[in-house]
Structure formats: C-alpha cells, structure tokens
C-alpha cells in the first residue's frame, strides 16, 4: 500500500490567532477543527493540510526567538515575485525574498510564531 502526506504539524502559540493568519493572509480554508486540540487548514481540492498545533509558551522556538525552519514547502501557480509583493503588502515577513537560482525560483517566509516556510512555483 503506498503512503502519502496527509498533514504536517505547525507549532503555534495561539491557535485562534494563527487560524486567522493562515486563512485571512495566506488564503487557506479550515478543513477540520477540534476545539480541544487541533485545527487543520489547507485547500480541500489539493489534499494536503497543515495541522495547527498549539504548544505551551515555554516551547523551544519561542525561547530562542529564532525562526524555526519547518521544512514545509508550499507550491504556487502564481508567479513568485507577484505573490511575494501581494503577501508582503499583507504584512507577511519574508526571510528570503524571491530569488532565481539555477534550478528555479525560491523564497522563504515566517508565520507569526516564527515557523519558516519554503515557497516555490508548482512544477508545470
């Protein structure tokens, strides 16, 4: 039986605040919600989801103050420089503005809790 990615956890300090950011700023939708522990966001037709997992305020990421490279790659069909401008106007903080490298385009941004995301164009 083949395996595939279903959900990736993203540690957040305040799930309700994070939910607003992921939906209002990045344009994701709420896919599942359990008031006791978790909320997942994403795009229903694309299959994968982010599991917003609330952690205590003493978590490692918040103690160091450094962005946490989540290793999560988000793909877009929108040209990366255009998406960068649109998200930057909404207040998204980029740790790496769009940059063309020999194998394509790459960019990185952080959420309000310092989780760092990779952003690349979707394969054609």
Image: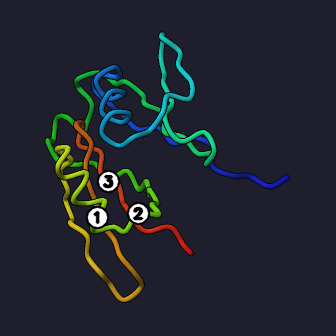
Which residue is at the front of the view, 54 or 25? 25
Whole-percent x, y for residue 17 in the image: 28, 23
Note whether 124 is above or below 17 in the view shown.
Answer: below
First-in-chain label (2 vs 3): 3
Q: Residue furthest left?
A: 65
Whole-percent x, y for residue 123 in the image: 54, 72
In this rendering, which labeled residue sits more in front, label 3 or label 1? 1
First-in-chain label (3 vs 1): 3
**Which residue appears at 37% of the width and 61% of the height?**
119
Residue 41 disc label = none
Note whether 122 is above or below 92 in the view shown.
Answer: below
Real-space Cα separation, disc 2 to disc 1, in angstroms = 7 Å
Whole-percent x, y for residue 73 in the image: 44, 58
Residues under numbered marks 2 and 1 in contact, where contact means CB atoms less than 8 Å apart: yes
Instruction: Determine the secondary structure under disc 2.
Output: loop
User: Quarter holding the C terminus?
Assistant: bottom right
- The residue carrying mark 3 is 69
Pointer 2: residues within 10 angstroms few (<14), some, or many (20+)? few
Residues under numbered marks 2 and 3 in contact, where contact means CB atoms less than 8 Å apart: no
Real-space Cα separation, disc 3 to disc 1, in angstroms = 23 Å
Note whether 3 is above or below 12 in the view shown.
Answer: below
Residue 78 disc label = 2
Pointer 1: residues within 10 angstroms few (<14), some, or many (20+)? few
Whole-percent x, y for residue 87 in the image: 25, 51
Instruction: Determine the secondary structure under disc 3.
Output: strand
**Quarter of the image where one finds residue 105:** bottom left
The type of colouring in the image is: rainbow
**Which residue appears at 63% of the width and 44% of the height?**
45
**Which residue appears at 53% of the width and 19% of the height?**
33
Pointer 3: residues within 10 angstroms few (<14), some, or many (20+)? some
């Amino acid at each position: 039986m083949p395996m595939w990615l279903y959900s990736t956890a993203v540690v957040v300090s305040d799930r309700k605040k994070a939910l607003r950011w992921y939906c209002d700023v990045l344009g994701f939708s709420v896919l599942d919600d359990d008031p006791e522990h978790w909320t997942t966001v994403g795009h229903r037709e694309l299959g994968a989801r982010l599991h917003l997992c609330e952690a205590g305020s003493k978590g490692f990421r918040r103690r160091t103050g450094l962005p946490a490279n989540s290793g999560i790659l988000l793909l877009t069909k929108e040209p990366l420089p255009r998406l960068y401008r649109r998200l930057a106007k909404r207040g998204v903080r980029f740790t790496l503005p769009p940059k063309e490298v020999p194998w394509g385009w790459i960019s990185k941004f952080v959420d309000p809790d310092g989780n760092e995301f990779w952003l690349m164009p979707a394969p054609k």
